[in-house]
Amino acid sequence: MRRVVLHPSAFVDWIGGGNSLRVEFEARQIQVVVPVSFVTDTMGLLAARGWPADRIVRAAGEIRRLGFQVTQPPDTELAMWLVRGMPPATAPYAALASWLDLPIAASDPELEIAFRTFPRA
């Protein structure tokens, strides 16, 4: 089974439907891995995009219901990404993907480029 680290930007597309990752997940073809901060990060992104509170609360409930694998990268891995200049909001995703050697799914084109091109240890 394929595994992927899911960034909140990709989850916003997931909520909207028609997302290929969602289709694969629902068909049990992929396992989604997220850091501990995923729910908070996702709610923050939705709030920043102007979503009303009731929709944000429903989205948070949806995340919990989906049962993504929640794990935290080692502090040393996270620190290395922060030291290299990765912003604190995105570093847990890069560190988790690096530590587990998994791809990151992000719908923000700038994030996708950063995750692919950011220097690794």
Image (cartoon, rainbow, N blue to C red):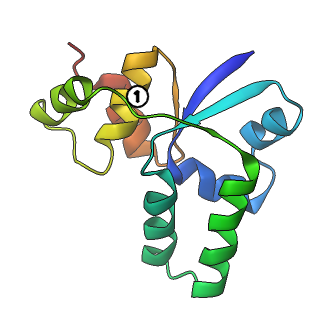
Residue 120 vertical position relative to residue 62 in the rendered view, above or below? above
Q: Please tell me in which quadrant of the rendered image residue 105 appears.
A: top right
Residue shown at the point (50%, 82%) measured from the top left: 50
Up the image or down, 34 lies above or below 77; here it is below
Tally of numbered discs:
1
Q: In the image, is 62 to the left or to the right of 53?
A: right
Q: Give the percent coordinates (x, y) of residue 49.
A: 48, 75
At mark 1, the secondary structure is helix
Residue 52 visible from this viewpoint: no
Graded by Cα atoms within 10 Å as few (under 14), some (14 to 19) or many (20 or more), the crowding at tag 1 reads many
| Residue 48 quadrant | bottom left
Is residue 17 shown above or below 100? below
Nearer-the-camera pick, 29 or 49: 29
Above or below, 35 against 80 in this view is: below
Can the viewer see residue 41 in this picture? yes
The residue beneath circle 1 is 96
What residue appears at the point 79 percent right and 35 percent down from the top-left corner? 25
Left or right: residue 15 versus residue 99 is right
Q: Is residue 46 left or right of residue 88?
A: right
Q: Residue furthest left?
A: 83
Residue drawn at point x = 46 percent, y = 14 percent: 101
**Position in image of residue 120 (x %, y %):** 24, 16
Q: Is residue 26 left or right of residue 101?
A: right
Q: Position of residue 32 (x, y in %)?
A: 64, 34
Amino acid found under the numbered disc labelled 1: Leu
The N terminus sits in image quarter: top right
Task: State the image quarter where residue 116 is shown.
Answer: top left
| Quadrant placement of the C terminus | top left
